[in-house]
Image: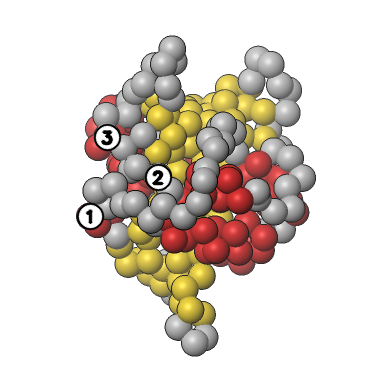
Amino acid sequence: MNVISMQTATPSWSGPRYRIHRYPTTLIDRLQLRDGRSVTIRPVLPQDVELQRAFVAALSPTMRYRRFHSPVHELPEATLNYMTDVDYASHMALLATTSVPGGRETQVAEARWVRREPPDSTDIADFALAVADDWQRAGLGALLLGKLSDSAAAQGIRRLSGDVLADNEGMRRLLKRSGWRQAPDRFDARLVVAQLDLDAASNDRPSLAA
């Protein structure tokens, strides 16, 4: 249900770079979902490549298609590194993780935004959201969406925007409940464009835990 695509260019990458750009520890949170399960929400780290790889691989084909708008099986190494080596100012990614038997951390959801570059307006960011199949309908997507919006507003982003497959009814219901507006994409009948103005949302945001 909770999958939205954000299609961005992948820059070249030349090897491990565990470089932390002012890691935003204030965004780390431990939450209990309405079904009783607990997750840790935290900003991504450069060393999370394997977590991200396993998360994408474990998604069902439908969920992967909704996330990337193509029949992706696995992500190229350069894309994985682009998705995990972020600066938290022009590119933010929040992971939801939990522990499995043996204490190993596993990723169950992600949300991210990427600030647009000139000549586009730099106070607009494209966003993406994906929740693992077994973790849907527990309120996790709504919680991540709210935290993502807050983090974007704190970095001066005034609007979040993203493409959603028109038949992704679960995601569209979530966005509607969360105050997003939606309109058909003028160039692709498969898509709707979802947008949220963050200055307005901060004044009158509906409950995201519902």
Instruction: Tell me which label, 3 or 1, sits earlier in the chain.
Output: 1
Element type at marker 1? helix
**Marking on residue 26:** 1
Q: What residue type is labelled 2?
A: Val
Figure colour scheme: secondary structure
Instruction: Judge left or right: residue 185 versus residue 176.
Output: right
Q: Quadrant of residue 52?
A: bottom right
Nearer the observer: mark 2 or 3; the answer is 2
Q: What residue type is labelled 1?
A: Thr
Instruction: Judge left or right: residue 51 versus residue 38.
Output: right
> Are the residues tagged 1 and 2 within 8 Å (C-beta)?
no
Location of mark 2 (residue):
86
Instruction: Judge left or right: residue 100 versus residue 94.
Output: right
The percent coordinates of residue 91 (x first, y second) are 40, 39
Real-space Cα separation, disc 1 to disc 2, in angstroms = 16 Å
Count of marks overlaid on the render:
3
Nearer the observer: mark 1 or 2; the answer is 2
> Are the residues tagged 3 and 1 within 8 Å (C-beta)?
no
The image shows residue 131, relative to residue 195, as above or below, that is: below
Examine the rendering and report whether any part of residue 144 can be seen.
no
Residue closer to the observer: 195 or 107? 107
Element type at marker 2? loop
Q: Point out the residue furthest to the bottom here.
A: 102
Location of mark 3 (residue):
155
Element type at marker 3? loop
Real-space Cα separation, disc 2 to disc 3, in angstroms = 14 Å
The percent coordinates of residue 7 (x first, y second) are 59, 33
Instruction: Tell me which label, 1 or 2, sits earlier in the chain.
Output: 1
Real-space Cα separation, disc 3 to disc 1, in angstroms = 14 Å
* Residue depicted at 45% across the width and 83% down the height: 103
Q: What residue type is labelled 3?
A: Gln
